[in-house]
Image: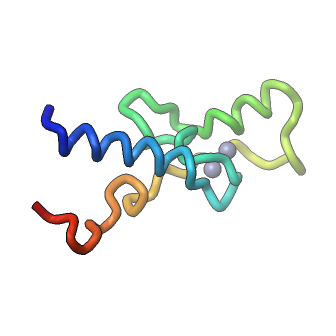
Amino acid sequence: MNDTTRRGERALRQRLRTTSCSDCEHPWEEHAGSADDAPTTCSECRYEADHDQVVDGRPLCRDTVPAAVIAPPPLRGDQP
Ligand SMILES: [Zn+2]
Ligand SMILES: [Zn+2]
């Protein structure tokens, strides 16, 4: 793995932590698609369900991380 890949992965982790799902408002990090072993439902939603903290009977979120979050268009000047 080269430095560019590592930087990209760190940036991706950062994006997953700092951006969130519009349906359940939990960070994308908790959603399907955020990692190879990610669950199919949002981990935070599952946690709330397990602890009777579900807001307004909201169903478990099954959204997956949008492609734009996983691989946003490269910034200008960011090309090799
Ligand atoms: Zn969600
Ligand atoms: Zn959620």
Quadrant of the rendered structure where residue 4 is?
top left
Residue 20, percent across and down? 60, 54
**Residue 38 appears left or right of 80:** right
User: How was the colour assigned to the protein in this rendering?
Assistant: rainbow
Figure quadrant, ligand 2:
top right
In x, y percent, where is residue 37?
41, 27
**Figure check: 14 above or below 22:** above
Name the residue located 87 percent from the left edge and 35 percent from the top edge.
53
Residue 32 falls left or right of residue 24: left
Q: Is residue 19 above or below residue 5?
A: below
Q: Would residue 62 appear left or right of 67 to someone viewing this image?
A: right
The quadrant where residue 1 appears: top left
Camera-nearest residue between 21 and 75: 75
In the picture, the quarter occupied by the C terminus is bottom left
For image coordinates 18% across by 39% down, the residue present is 3
Q: Residue at x 47, y 51 (%)?
A: 15
- The foreground one among 6 and 69 is 6
The answer to whether residue 75 is above or below residue 53 is below
Residue drawn at the location 84% of the way across and 40% of the way down: 54
Q: Residue furthest bottom?
A: 76
